[in-house]
């Protein structure tokens, strides 16, 4: 592929989703976009780039951006963040929000739903402590395709075996032929919406907890800073931001502080969430 | 080093599982049916048992029930690993005392995920 076409496509993807594609990622463009080109009756990436120049079609731009996202995820990914949520963050919020009895959680970049559903199952398991409480889970992603799958809550045998304890499969899933579907009671706990992290995030409202894992790694530092600053502004002063194992705020957003002893968790206030405990 | 007993009547499956588990630093024992597995366990309990369901002589479920009744038989972590992939079988295995359940086909990612869930990795 020539370098003009590469520029065209990588700039489009970067402007729209934040994903940084360097020249050594040509193979990634090819493996993701050639199938998309074929579906449109085009043979090569050159043809696809030509089509894009000629039509400037919004739907095509969206499809290209979506096709370049990496959607890898699984239930209770890394385990530890979910333990921390259950053992440290939730008990804090149960005390600190005892007045309004409302907890708002945002799962940014939720992919096919395993992450928000892990949180929902965890909360269901803790429901004895949550009677009378309203817990909202908003789960968002840039990709329509993953959101459709997430809403359906249908997973393959392989997917339900990655990270999901068998007891939770028994409790919260139904077998549907070859697939497994998560119960409607769990599905009802999560509200899925399309949202681009590069957009203005203030409209999503305030949150006590944000899970934003394994998406910032794809962005450059200015973009990370922009997203983190916006998140900080909508996160409660004693709220908790969970990042992925390879992600950090250090050197990028000074207004978020790591919480000592809780790896991968950040909070806006100097003596934030766990100062109390 | 933790020990893992692989119980499966298919030599190929035992070999594949052995490769993955040796890589994860387990000491491997093998049996090709439930009776053979029981004989091994009565001599010395392994830390983990990866257990097929359908086998000649004694199947996995019967083995598990007998294991859990024997002296020290509550100790090993038992992970079923079988082509039986319906909820009825899963429930039956768990109520008989299995700790986890893998539906075949399996790969390294699944074994690792399941073994870390039951705390043996
Ligand atoms: C690797 S997945 C991570 C899923 C889950 N958070 C986890 O840790 O398992 C990354 C997700 O980020 C989404 N994504 C990428 N760029 C985005 C953006 N600009 N806005 C919102 N979501 C984005 C992708 O569509 C993909 O589903």
Image (cartoon, rainbow, N blue to C red):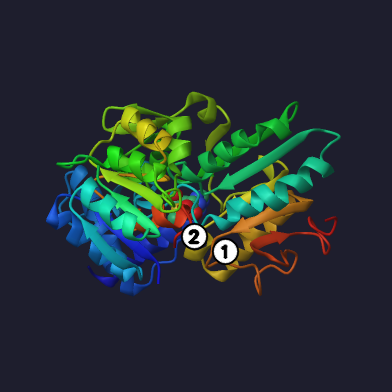
Image quadrant where one finds the C terminus of chain A: bottom right
Q: Nearer the viewer, residue B61 or A185?
A: B61
Q: Which x, y percent locates residue B96?
A: 39, 36
Mark 2, other Cα within 10 Å: few <14 / some 14–19 / many ≥20:
many
Residue named by callout 2: A18
Q: Which x, y percent locates residue A257?
A: 73, 66
Beta carbon of the mark 2 residue lies under 8 A of ligand 1: yes
Q: Along the polypeptide, which appears first: circle 1 or circle 2?
A: 2
Numbered label tally: 2
| Local secondary structure at mark 2 | loop
Q: Would you place residue A213 above or below residue A186 in this image?
A: below
Q: Is residue A90 left or right of residue B35?
A: right
In the rendered image, is residue A107 in sight? yes
Q: Would you place residue A139 above or below residue A5 in this image?
A: above
Measured Cα–Cα span from mark 1 to mark 2: 7 Å
Residue A97 tag number = none
Residue placed at 31% from the left, 54% from the top? A53
Marks 1 and 2 share the same chain: yes
Q: Are marks 1 and 2 in contact (CB under 8 Å)?
A: yes
Beta carbon of the mark 1 residue lies under 8 A of ligand 1: no
Q: Which x, y percent locates residue B56?
A: 14, 41
Residue named by callout 1: A223
Q: Which x, y percent locates residue A161?
A: 37, 45
| Local secondary structure at mark 1 | helix
Residue placed at 36% from the left, 48% from the top? B79
Q: Nearer the viewer, residue A222 or B36?
A: B36
Chain of the residue under the numbered disc 2 shown in the image? A
Location of residue A112 by image quarter: top left
Q: Nearer the viewer, residue A240 or B82?
A: B82
């Amino acid at each position: 592929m020539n370098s003009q076409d590469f520029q065209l496509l990588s700039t489009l993807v970067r402007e729209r989703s934040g994903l940084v594609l360097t020249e050594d990622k040509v193979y990634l463009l090819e493996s993701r976009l050639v199938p998309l080109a074929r579906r449109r009756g085009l043979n090569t990436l050159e043809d696809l780039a030509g089509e894009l120049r000629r039509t400037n079609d919004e739907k095509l731009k969206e499809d290209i951006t979506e096709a370049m996202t990496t959607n890898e995820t699984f239930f209770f990914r890394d385990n530890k963040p979910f333990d921390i949520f259950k053992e440290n963050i939730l008990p804090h919020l149960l005390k600190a929000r005892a007045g309004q009895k409302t907890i708002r959680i945002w799962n940014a970049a939720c992919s096919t739903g395993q992450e928000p559903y892990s949180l929902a199952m965890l909360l269901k398991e803790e429901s004895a402590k949550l009677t009378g409480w309203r817990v909202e889970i908003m789960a968002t992603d840039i990709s329509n395709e993953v959101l459709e799958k997430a809403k359906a809550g249908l997973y393959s045998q392989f997917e339900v075996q990655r990270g999901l304890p068998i007891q939770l499969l028994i409790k919260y899933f139904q077998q549907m032929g070859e697939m497994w579907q998560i119960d409607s009671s769990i599905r009802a706990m999560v509200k899925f919406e399309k949202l681009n992290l590069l957009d203005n995030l203030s409209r999503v409202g305030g949150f006590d907890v944000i899970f934003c894992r394994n998406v910032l790694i794809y962005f450059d530092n200015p973009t990370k800073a922009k997203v983190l600053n916006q998140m900080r502004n909508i996160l409660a002063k004693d709220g908790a931001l969970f990042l992925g194992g390879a992600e950090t705020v250090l050197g990028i957003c000074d207004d978020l502080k790591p919480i000592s002893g809780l790896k991968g968790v950040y909070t806006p206030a100097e003596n934030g969430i766990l100062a109390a405990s | 080093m933790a020990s893992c007993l692989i119980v499966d009547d298919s030599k190929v499956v035992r070999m594949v599982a052995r490769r993955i588990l040796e890589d994860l630093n387990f000491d491997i024992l093998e049996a090709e049916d439930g009776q053979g597995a029981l004989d091994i366990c009565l001599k010395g309990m392994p830390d983990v048992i990866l257990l097929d369901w359908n086998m000649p002589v004694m199947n996995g479920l019967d083995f598990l029930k007998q294991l859990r009744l024997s002296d020290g038989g509550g100790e090993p972590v038992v992970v079923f690993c079988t082509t039986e992939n319906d909820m009825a079988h899963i429930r039956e295995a768990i109520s008989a005392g299995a700790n986890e359940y893998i539906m075949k086909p399996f790969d390294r990612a699944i074994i690792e995920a399941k073994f870390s869930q039951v705390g043996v990795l």
